[in-house]
Image (cartoon, grey):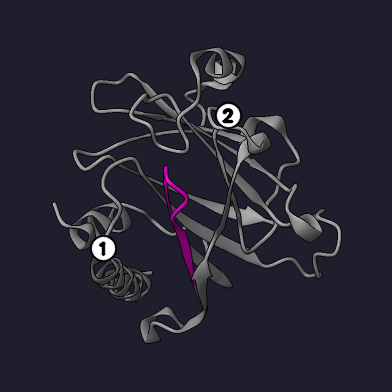
Amino acid sequence: MSTVLLGAAALSARTAQAQTQDLFVINVDENGNGSYVEYTPPYPGGTVIGAGNLTPALINGVPGDGLSYVLPYPININTNSNQWLSISDLDGAQSDLIHFANTGPGGAGVLNFYSNDTDGDLADVSPAFWSTIAGNWSTQFATSEDANGIAFYSTYIDTGGVPGDPAPHPTVEAFYYFNSGPVPEPTAMGLFLGGSALLLKRRNHRN
C-alpha cells in the first residue's frame, strides 16, 4: 500500500470531534528522521502555515535507551494515563512504546520512541531497558502497525495549563505516523502530505 493510500485509510476513518484551530501532521521513524506540517483552517484550502524537521537525539545520549524528538508544540500531560502510547505489530506482539512529555526547550513537547526490535535502529532499546518501561504498556492508548510497519495515532491536544500557553487555549489536533519500516523517500512524503490536505478538505465538507 502506498504512503498516500495509507494516509487515506487512516484519515478517512477518523471522525472529527470538533473544528480544530491548528492541525499537525507528525512523521517519525526509528532512525532520527522526523518532520511536521502545520495546517490552519480553512482546511479546504490546504493552508500550510508551518513545516520543518523534528530535532532527534538519543535518550540519555546512550544507544539502547531509545530515541527522542522535540515537537513544535507543548502537549497536555496533566494525567499519567495519557503520557504513553503502545504500538503492536501485525501479530499483536509488543513492538514500540511512545512517551510524551513537556521536557523540551522552553517547555516544548517531546516524543520519546522506544522500539522493542533488535534490527539496529536508533530507537531500539536493550532488553534490560525495555523491562524498565514495559510496565507502561496499556490498551487505553494503543494502536498497531500495518503491513508497511507504519502505525497511525491521532489526538486532540489541550495545551491548557502549560506555562506560557496563551488563553483562550486552542483546540489542536495531531496526526502521528510512526514508521518502523523503510524511511519514506522525500517525493513519497510530499505526496502523502498532499493527500492529507485533500482528505482534510473532504472530511470538513462532510462536517
* Element at label 2: loop
Of residues 187 and 201, the one nearer the viewer is 187
Tell me where residue 70 sits by quadrant. Answer: bottom right
* Element at label 1: loop
Label 1 packing within 10 angstroms: few (<14), some (14-19), many (20+): few
Tell me where residue 83 sits by quadrant. Answer: top right
Residue depicted at 48% across the width and 65% down the height:
36
Report if residue 50 is visible in the image: yes
Q: Which residues are magenta?
A: 28-37
Residue depicted at 47% across the width and 24% down the height:
139
Residue under numbered circle 1: 185
**Amino acid type for the residue under numbered disc 1:** Glu
Q: In the rendered view, does 16 fall on the left or right side of 134? A: left
Per the model, the C-alpha gap separating discs 2 and 1 is 27 Å
Of residues 82 and 93, the one nearer the viewer is 93
Principal SS element in the magenta part? strand
Image coordinates for residue 59, horizontal then vertical, percent: 63, 37
Image coordinates for residue 42, horizontal then vertical, percent: 46, 83
**Amino acid type for the residue under numbered disc 2:** Asp
Residue under numbered circle 2: 65
Q: Is residue 148 magenta?
A: no
Q: In the rendered view, does 101 fall on the left or right side of 8? A: right
Q: Is residue 180 above or below residue 3?
A: above
- Does label 2 or label 1 sit earlier along the sequence? 2
Q: Is residue 31 magenta?
A: yes
